[in-house]
Image (cartoon, rainbow, N blue to C red):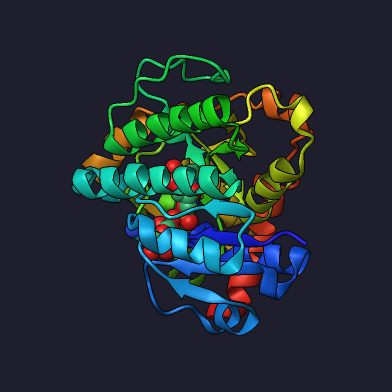
Amino acid sequence: MKRILVTGALGQIGSELTMSLRERYGNDNVIASDLKTQPNGKLLDSGPFESFDCTNADALSAIVRKYKIETIYHLAAILSAVAENNPGLAWNVNINGLYNVLEVAREFDCAVFIPSSIGAFGPSTPVDNTPQDTIQRPNTMYGVTKVTGELLCDYYYKRFGVDTRGVRYPGIISNETLPGGGTTDYAVEIYYEAIKNKHYTCNLPAGTFLDMMYMPDAIKAATDLMEADPAKLIHRNAFNVTAMSIDPELLAAEISKHIPEFTIDYDIDPVKAEIAASWPNSIDDLAARKQWNWKPDYNLATMTKDMIEILSKKLL
Ligand code: NAD
Ligand code: SER
């Protein structure tokens, strides 16, 4: 059985990925960790939890040694909008935290899963069907850290043989833990507001197309890639993966099929709008499909039906 450490386990992705890994590999084999100290009941009751700062190399190393960790899912990070407000914090966590994870992985021979993002692209990247290998000149601190992270992961594999793997996630839509300050957060908030208030004021302009994915597919992407035959991985890190390309109007129209009274209006956040405008409309995930059989299970219609069913039970 693998011994796994998840950093950032209390975040949007980590809270659900940890539970899925525990189901797959056994509760006691998956150690949840975060800077925050207060896990919810489910995470705390189902297995080990450790609180530490991933920028503290000694603390990280002690945990890896204590639990004889073999695989690290490194999810601790600062997301795009928060990063733009605090670039120094984003650099420290996203770069120094990642460096510590790669160093400990080198020392203790761990495999590492690291998410990059559609934020690793920038205004000069082709916007439609963005290829796997293309121009990456992001103009946000989040994007700078994500491109640097992609390169560092490639370097640690090539130079030291560390088994690094990763995807470029699009915006992730989920119903368990709220997102942590990204540009795509609107696509989660819209469901909560549609159910609670039948109205949503969106902070990105209509016509802002971005890639998105439902959480079960995000979890599937991480676990499938980590289980994939390494001989078939030409890229290893930063695989484009997507499930849909949508804008606020399309999302609102789909929600209206379930909640006919639902209305949307706009109050644009200039920082988020500028970040979103610098990202692709849609990315091409052919490399992931070919190299490790990536394929999403959910589209906009099936995700929306599921989101509304689950959130209605949770919120009403
Ligand atoms: P999140 O903000 O919801 O969670 C991140 C977690 O990391 C938080 O619980 C936070 O407390 C923790 N953390 C922050 N600083 C830390 C530190 N110094 N030490 C330890 N823990 C720390 O983020 P998420 O949405 O779950 O994202 C996880 C990863 O996936 C990130 O690398 C992110 O860039 C990437 N990603 C996310 C999305 C998305 O839409 N959620 C899209 C693309 C990429
Ligand atoms: N959802 C993430 C963000 O907006 C994309 O990386 O920051």
Residue 133 appears in view: yes
The residue shown at (35%, 39%) is 205
Residue 277 location, x and y as percent? Answer: 35, 30
Residue 268 appears in view: no
Q: Pick the residue in front: 261 or 19.
A: 19
Q: How many marks?
A: 0
Residue 185 location, x and y as percent? Answer: 42, 53
Which image quarter: residue 51?
A: bottom left
Q: Quadrant of ligand 1?
A: bottom left
Give the left or right position of residue 142, taking residue 105 as reference.
left
Residue 232 location, x and y as percent? Answer: 77, 26
The residue shown at (54%, 38%) is 246
Whether residue 182 is situated above or below residue 285 in the rendered picture: below
Whether residue 47 is situated above or below residue 232 in the rendered picture: below
Look at the image and tell me in which quarter the N terminus lies: bottom right
Look at the image and tell me in which quarter the C terminus lies: bottom right
The residue shown at (39%, 64%) is 59
Q: Pick the residue in front: 276 or 229.
A: 229
The residue shown at (58%, 38%) is 166
Q: Pick the residue in front: 253 or 169.
A: 169
Whether residue 59 is situated above or below residue 92 in the rendered picture: below
Give the left or right position of residue 165, taking residue 20 as reference.
left
Q: Pick the residue in front: 73 or 287.
A: 73
Give the left or right position of residue 273, taking residue 127 as reference.
left
Which image quarter: residue 260?
A: bottom right
Residue 243 location, x and y as percent? Answer: 65, 39
Give the left or right position of residue 115, taking residue 299 as reference.
left
